Image: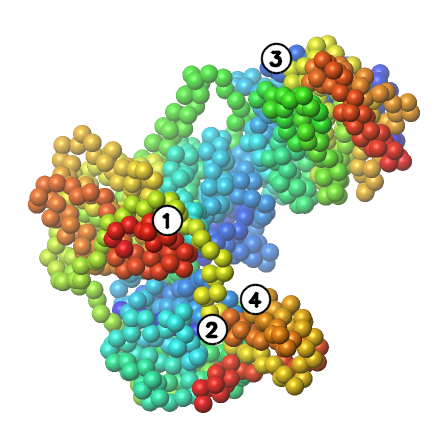
Amino acid sequence: MNETAFKNVKSLPSSHLLGTGTPMCAGCGGLEALHEIYDVLGEKSVFVNAAGCMTLLAVYPFTPFRGSWLYTAMASAPAGAQGIRDALDILKQKGEIEEEEDLQVVTLTGDGAAYGMGLSATSGVIERNLDFLYICYDNEGYGNTGQQYSGATPHGAKTATSLGLSGFAGYKKPLFDIWAAHRPAYVATVIGAEPLDLARKIEKAKSLKGPRLIIALSPCPTGWDFDPKESVNIGKLAVKSGVWPLKEYVDGQVVHTKLPTRRLPVVRYLETQGRFRHLFEPERQEGLLKEIQQRVDEYWAAVTC
Amino acid sequence: MFRIRFHGRGGQGMKTASRILGTAFFLEGYEVQDAPRYGAERRGAPIFAFVRADRRPIQERGIIRQADLVVVADDSLVPVPAADVLAGCDANTVLLINSFQSAEVWRQRLNLQGPILTLPAMEDVEDRAELPYVGAACAGAAAGLSGVIGQTSLEQAIAEELGHLGAAVIAANLERASNAFQSLSEQAGLVKPGRTFSAEGWQTPDWIELPFEQADVSAPAIHAGLTSEAIKTGAWRTMRPLVDYARCNRCWWVCSTFCPDGAIRVDEERYPQIDYDHCKGCLICVAQCPPHAISAVAEHLAAEGVES
Amino acid sequence: MKRRLLTGNGAAAWAARLAGVDYVPAFPITPQTEIIESLANWIDRGEMPGRLVTLESEHSMLTAAGAAAATGVRVFSATSSQGLLYAMEMLYTVSGWRAPFVLVNVSRGLSSPITLEPDHNDILAARDSGFLQIHCATCQEVLDSVLLAYRLGEDNRVRLPVLVNMDGFYLSFTREPVEVPEAEAVAAFLPSFQAGEIRFRASAPESQAVAVLGGGPYSYFRYETHLAARIAIQVYDELADVFEQSFGRRHAAVECYRCEDADYLFVMIGSFATKARAAVDSLREAGWSIGLLRPRLFRPFPEAQVRRLLAGRRAVAVIDQNLSFGAGGVLYAELAAALYGEKAAPPVLASFVGGLGGRDIPPEEFYEIARLIRDAAERGETPPPRLLYTEAELRETRKLQAIAKVERAGLGAKS
């Protein structure tokens, strides 16, 4: 990555824009990613939110944002971004507002909206080449309702609706690929535990026009069942084990921004979380563990850059 | 109030006819309502449009059941049940049929109480779905028969309704409409404003209490397959494909496979048999037949051939 | 002012054009398409400013409409039937944003079974959404009501979105003479949208549509929306006067046709009410003392006016083009609620359901309804609710059921 203001971790901001006092869980990996993103993005923004944990960021009369916010509904936050972006463009075109009154329009949803109910609205705005940023905080389940499985839940994970011995029978949907197949301006995966990588990606997204979409894997103490203090460690393990590849799509190319030379075994990541405990006890489910590792290996075997 | 219905096929310009007539009435100072009846507005399928015109604001709405004038743009529709051309025709209804056959033939055929006129306004075209200017001609005829629309208003109405199509198209339509208008000059005023409804006496509606019926009966479900075959879409056809069996090379599949409606069956001898009850006349079979063994003939001519 | 023939759809499109709308989020559905096609073509040809965006669903369309309105531009949109229902979550949602815009609904019966023809179950499903509702009986009213709706919704006392309803086919595809006002006259009546604090701007942080915890604040916000809708009755009445001064046409919140001295009244909403007018004329000629009451404003419901206009009548027939399964006609229930406790309430308030899925109501049915309520008034008892449905119609339906291979054994006795 060239021409970045974020040469190293020391260039990351040390005072932060997102306010305190939100009702997000202690140790929330999504909030951590959001506040890192907001630092780079800045306060001249309007967040268009869909139903999910972060709906509760703004509870009357409290908001942690310095800028603006509009809650829409679970399925149509991207369409809300469309309405605001179009309206701001119309007002600028008519000369009713000055350029400095303009806002970056940001859609903020969880994985439930991004991977499922809101996918058609997202597809629509990308197709219409909307100039906006989409941030999905992905905690791999319907977290705000008690962590039922969603289209983002990984294979084998225990959720409130997959309590059996094998956990969730499905596989995490390739949302990055689905978004990238639309050929938008930018798609990236990030994680709060890798703040430098995150900052550079948001910086890049901010510099581009058109649809820019970010998925932030969001370690979730409540839904994944781990001690809140482990949130960053688990995030780092997700990257080091290869479970959460950090990558970006730009100009038709997918590039990995971190190529783990020596990947840690996936069990190192899985064993940190209660949602995978049934894979280890009362009996170790070798078959399932092997399958999960194998899928990660297959992914990386196909990666060239 | 004048109540006028236009019947034709999808593509023959019945909506245009109703709009030209509606605008012409309007230009004569009438209150007007005109509308097409949307539904299966497929090319060749029977459709209709209607016009109401009155000196007073019009409160009536919807389909005209009893018309003072019914104009049929394509005489092949008259016997088609789905077209329902003669619905509500009584002694006060003038029926105008665009036809090369004489009014006398139609009078004998239909045995109606009201007057029947014909208007030979068709161009000599094979495919009736492409009857040019017939909408304008029908509107012109209806305007003439009403006796209250001047030629100037008719011409202005055509210019307004077809303005987007350019001068040449307007001119051609004007000519057909004027011809139709003038050809009926002796009958001007034959169509009279129809009845006003009276509450002095009326036929009591045969209302019933709907009986309760369980869902196995009363849910909107069809409990069998293939029931759509009761719909005779052959009535849409304006061009008929005919197989020259001497030329057919019995390939066994081309026409039958490409027919979207599945209306071509291949028999045991590997000859195609066209189901004319359902063939819509798209002519894909004509276009695709490798030895060019299928040709298209005008449906109205083919139908006459069958009759004679 | 030019009088010309326009369909209801054409009248709606012209109204949007004259209102100088900035933004039209769209999604096609029969029988509404001509509205958005007209606007798209005018915008493409540069005949009107503004931006039209086709979204991928009505749910998204309404979201974009509300979001743009909340950013401070004048928004117009249109839908029908299933589209209105698909957008329903957002109807309820965006009304709470307190950002005004106008949505035209072209009424069409709801699935199942699916149909293209009109009745009012679609628009009445939005009854409690927070959108105000104006119901039109003519194409002229469609044009005028859209203009009125902008003034009404944008009034600072109100600040709510407004639905303008017209019947599919009977208005949407039917041309009638419509006076299209001059642009200057419209601009004088309806100046450009003064959004004020309805905005998203860099200099003015605004959090809109946030969550609340607890019933206290929730009740406050919801009830305030209700009070704004209630104030809209008064605002509407004021605007009807202004509109009449500007354009010479009066659109009262409740139309009262030949009902000043009437003993009997039909009550209807929508375009079929003009059929009732025609029936009133015929019945008057035959010596009947009868009239028509037609609420144009349905939300807020002008029950004080309705109550006053119904008081002292001998009998009233409410004809509902809708059906609340398990209850009956919706308008009937609204009127009954409005009349409760009214000393001079008509002794007979009879319910009729008809015109479902575009089913016609011919003149003789109106006459028969008049006879039924007159007889009921003489007997002093309200007749049971009646569906306008004939034996001939059931016979036709039986023929269809035979094709559908419905077991004859299950058919009711009266077939």
Q: Amino acid at mark 1?
A: Val
- The residue under the point 31% across, 85% down is B107
Query: Circle 2: is it few (<14), some (14-19), or many (20+) Cα within 10 Å?
Result: many
The spot of residue C224 in percent (x, y) is 40, 25
**Closer to the N terminus: mark 4 or mark 2?**
2
Mark 3 element type: loop
- The residue under the point 59% across, 45% down is C56
- From the viewer's perspective, is the residue at label 1 or at label 4 nearer? 1
- From the viewer's perspective, is the residue at label 3 or at label 4 nearer? 4
Res A169 → quadrant: top right
4 and 2 marks in contact (CB < 8 Å): no
The residue that mark 3 highlights is: A21
- The residue under the point 49% across, 45% down is C83
The residue that mark 1 highlights is: B217
Res B245 → quadrant: bottom right
Q: Amino acid at mark 4?
A: Asp
The residue that mark 2 highlights is: B235
The chain under label 1 reads B
